[in-house]
Amino acid sequence: MKYAVVESSGLAYPSNIGDFLDAVIVSKGDAYDYSGTICIVDGVNFLEQVADIETVERQLKFAHLVIISKVDLIDEEQLEKVKSKIREINEKVEIVESINGKTDYNFLEKDLIAEGWLGVEDTTNTPENRPKTLTLTYKEDLTKEKLTQFLDIIKKDSYRIKGFFKLEYGWNQVDGVGNRIDYKPTDKGGEDSELVIISKIGNQLIRPIFSAWEEVVGKEMKLR
């Protein structure tokens, strides 16, 4: 392992990376060349995420380098707010920008932990607060209006919603983070539409999903 990489959804964080590395040494010996932790920040949704999800701060606090993605989708004012918030949480971390999915990868040649300032904390993940992943499948076409209406109901309790859905005009890749739901036409599809929903409230989201689907669509779907 060269780098640990996390992204700013709050679903994973590097605060206890030392525990993992110690376990590797015990089982495999000195089998890694660990050079640091990289956190990928969603420039569009970060300010909302960091206000809403506690573990986003933990990700940044223990990161050695931050990549701000989607810089092409935000203005200079928001970019500066994102950088300022990152610096507030981790004043030492190096920041690079990604535009149109491209960035300067010179950092891959660096030893990001050369200064030796990575902290370690025990994980706060427990069976009770661990995010729950649910998969919704549907066999028929659906209008974009109805799918958006359904997603608007459940998105407040979801970390992430993504998948492929057949709408009235063809297959779309669906990507939802925070309050933003994006649709992108695609040739990739399958027999059934499928959405992966990562719940903020564990299994408690199952009932609201069924309720919202029945209210908006009113046809059979499967959730597992």
Image (tube, rainbow, N blue to C red):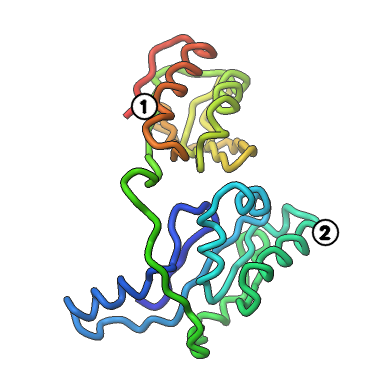
In this orientation, which residue lies closer to the viewer: 191 or 158?
158
Q: In which quarter of the image is the C terminus?
A: top left
Q: Residue 173 carries which label?
A: none
In x, y percent, where is residue 25? 23, 81
Please, what secondary structure does the residue beneath circle 1 have? loop
Q: In which quarter of the image is the N terminus?
A: bottom left
- Can you say whether 222 is above or below 64 in the image? above
**Residue at 46% in and 22% down:** 208
Please, what secondary structure does the residue beneath circle 2 have? helix
In this orientation, which residue lies closer to the viewer: 36 or 22?
22
To which residue does mark 1 refer? Answer: 191
Can you tell which quarter of the image residue 203 is in? Answer: top left
In x, y percent, where is residue 78? 77, 56
In x, y percent, where is residue 56? 54, 57
Can you tell which quarter of the image residue 170 is in? Answer: top right
Mark 1 touches mark 2? (CB < 8 Å): no
Q: Which mark is residue 77?
A: 2
